[in-house]
Amino acid sequence: MNITLIGMSGAGKSTIGKQLAKKLGRKFIDIDNLIRGKIGTDLQTFIDNHGDDEFIELEEQIVIGLRELDNYVIATGGSIVYSDKAMKHLKEISTIVYLDVSFSLIARRISPSKRGLVGFKDKGLKDLYHERKKLYERYLDVRIKIKKGAKKGDIVERIIFSCSDKVSTSGNV
């Protein structure tokens, strides 16, 4: 079984995901990197030129294209929860771990204009955060609350412990 990390931009999905994959002896996939490779530019430029809906559709296509994966750690983009189809697929192939970070910490960590944030121009960061939080909660299997100053290694250990009935460090389910 795979582990998929969801949460806001700036929650640490890629950073934690890489460490989690290493600790569990698994491969790591970053959906944003797959998208960048396909579009040949940064995410914000694509969103500016093609719009939020086209980005969400592209993100969905890439996630649904993930087939035959086993024992991977997957870091999604923060907007993946706007696609019910993509989230249902991820729930079929993985345990969904929500990295729950406070709004104040997210606001300190990211610069929305440089991040490729779907919905930011229309809603602003705070409204976007609250809208997505409800969606993350809808799809999660496990919630990991992350507080300011939390050590990455401790977060990884909490994920492993919280998913211990589903994963092992040898990669077996």
Image: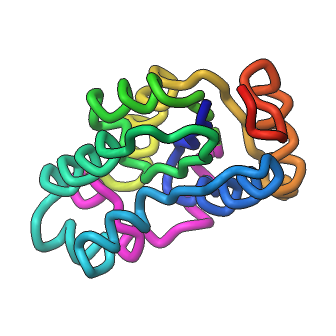
The image quadrant where one finds the C terminus is: top right
Q: Is residue 27 left or right of residue 116?
A: right
Q: Is residue 92 left or right of residue 55?
A: right
Residue 1 place in picture, x, y as percent: 61, 30
Residue pictured at 27% horizontal, 35% vertical: 83
The prevailing secondary structure element of the residues shown in magenta is helix
Q: Can residue 173 be seen in the rendering of this structure? A: yes
Q: Is residue 39 left or right of residue 148?
A: left
To which quarter of the image does residue 64 belong?
top left
Near-viewer residue (137 or 156)? 156
The image shows residue 76, relative to residue 113, as above or below, that is: above
Question: Which residue is outermost to the bottom?
Answer: 41
Residue 156 place in picture, x, y as percent: 81, 47
Residue pictured at 50% horizontal, 59% vertical: 30
Residue 111 place in picture, x, y as percent: 47, 72
Is residue 109 a member of the stretch shown in magenta? yes
To which quarter of the image does residue 14 belong?
bottom right
Residue pictured at 52% horizontal, 56% vertical: 29
The image shows residue 43, relative to residue 94, as above or below, that is: below
Residue stretch in magenta = 101-122
Residue pictured at 18% horizontal, 47% vertical: 57
Query: What count of labels does the image hold?
Result: 0
Is residue 169 a member of the stretch shown in magenta? no
To which quarter of the image does residue 101 belong?
top right
Q: Can residue 98 be seen in the rendering of this structure? A: no
Near-viewer residue (14 or 44)? 14
Q: Is residue 104 left or right of residue 172?
A: left
Residue 77 place in picture, x, y as percent: 43, 53
Q: How is the image coloured?
A: rainbow
The image shows residue 39, relative to residue 104, as above or below, that is: below
